[in-house]
Amino acid sequence: MADSTTDLRVERKPKLSETVVAAIRKQLLAGEMPPGHKLPTEGQLTETFGVSRTVIREALAKLAADGLVEARQGAGVFVTEHISTTLGVLAADMGAKDSIALNVLEVRLAIEIESAGLAAIRRNAAQEAAIQEAFFEFERLLLDSQPTGPADLAFHRAIASATNNPFYVEMLDVLGRRAIPCDVTSPWSTELVQSDDYQRGLQREHLVILNAISAGDANAAREAMRAHLAASQQRYRERLQARQAYYAKSVAAASTG
Amino acid sequence: MADSTTDLRVERKPKLSETVVAAIRKQLLAGEMPPGHKLPTEGQLTETFGVSRTVIREALAKLAADGLVEARQGAGVFVTEHISTTLGVLAADMGAKDSIALNVLEVRLAIEIESAGLAAIRRNAAQEAAIQEAFFEFERLLLDSQPTGPADLAFHRAIASATNNPFYVEMLDVLGRRAIPCDVTSPWSTELVQSDDYQRGLQREHLVILNAISAGDANAAREAMRAHLAASQQRYRERLQARQAYYAKSVAAASTG
DNA sequence: CATGCAAAAGTCATCATACAACTTAATGAT
DNA sequence: ATCATTAAGTTGTATGATGACTTTTGCATG
């Protein structure tokens, strides 16, 4: 209903600067411009893309905000040194929403990693049981071929609760409201998310976390959670690319028909 | 010359748009403009801040990239339902109670640890310089026997900025408001907080963090930050005990007199 | 020739103006 | 009263000019 789920409608306002951002980002991702290299002048980019300096400057500002480039007055615009580690290179052409979602997910990552570590140290018997319960519920739903999203959320929430710090739960709720789709069913590529292999992988990662927490090993719990969420990031990225391909296909179909 | 005394300081020119961004962001985080509210027009903002429309537009573009506002052509710029808004409400709940402050500090711990790790692999030259600058500013204030609180905050904030993830900065701003005082002067035990040994210890921990980030070692940066914040937690506890002891002593003195 | 300083060219940052595209509210006709 | 049209207001884009800063060039001096 909300615009966020209108998967059929692309961003209704494709600003010119976003087009330029996508183009330059693609070049950066392709490695056509090595780190430290100087980008063409604003004037040159103006001629290249056939837009005004206003648009070029806005595009460069956006890229700088993502940490992909760095502008030095009087010198020029340069590619960031550690560009390969930035979030911006994950998906070449993504809208502002995707960019925000990735950044929020990264904050959730910080919360959940520490959450797992604290849970390993502080969990009491009942809390450990609650985590196990969520784990097995996930298992049951998986065998019944039912949506496992709620159980997944419950698992993470149970871990946050086991920290005995109510703010971790609150943070998870606040951040999860937007970022959770990473591991839950979403409007696009539903088949992929609900595939057995996909969810089996999730559950394997969950098991490592659960074992570390049960063993009271904070470091192992943190590393397991880090691995789990890093894998989730990777899955999210693949999902973005899949959606992009889907759009491209639908557009092609529309043009032929 | 006079500049020779400040050669350690990296002269960095704050772009006008950054100033505007900071001003508007402060208003947004303070909740002065609820989600859905329409911001003043670009023309009005130019008069308010006394800058050109170019600067205003760049600032708004930055805020839009961070997901704080959304511009609709022909209609205006509107405040979005961003994470920080809900967090602001959350932060309002955490009053002045120490029990809550400790819990909040623990959340900040999660954010800052991951923040250090990301900064180590993503920081660019300017951001690394900003972190160093805050470090040396702390040093200078320490030698001058001036309050080091602001420099301490700037150090942590510079690290959050170096993640190139705007939400890490926002989280720090929201959480730090109540949690930071743990390392700043406080009404009680002022001597302890401002003692040279105390601040020397802080600076030693800061140096380890700075070195790890400069070396690009994410794991070392995380561990250094973890050690630093764990030590801060410990110091906070000691402070609470000191206050309790002080109170007990004063009660005893009152009863004897 | 080497060195240091000054001039110049190149580039980003900011300002100012104008027009186009879009949204909303007001207006007027049916 | 309803709907289409118009008008006003706002953001998006284009263009030109100027200031601030960096780098390079060139010259003068030792």
Image: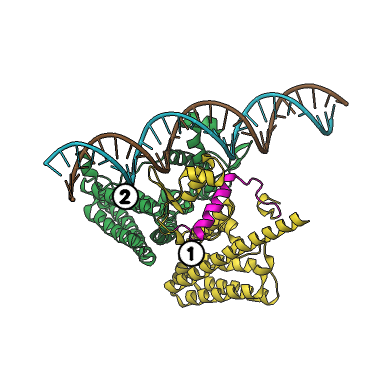
Chain colours: A yellow, B green, C brown, D cyan
- Mark 1: amino acid: Asn
> Is A140 a magenta residue?
no
Residue lying at 30% horizontally and 47% vertically, measured from the top left:
B10
The quadrant in which residue A189 appears is bottom right
Give the residues drawn in magenta, as a range.
Answer: A8-33
Residue A155 left/right relative to B245: right
Q: Quadrant of the C terminus of chain A?
A: bottom right
How many neighbours does mark 2 have within 10 angstroms: few (below 14), some (14-19), or many (20 or more)? Answer: many
Q: Name the residue under label 2.
A: B134
Residue lying at 62% horizontally and 72% vertically, measured from the top left:
A198
Residue B233 left/right relative to A68: left
Helix, strand or loop under label 2: helix
The quadrant in which residue B232 appears is bottom left
How many neighbours does mark 1 have within 10 angstroms: few (below 14), some (14-19), or many (20 or more)? Answer: some
Q: Name the residue under label 1.
A: A164
* Image x and y of residue B176, in percent: 41, 50
Helix, strand or loop under label 1: loop
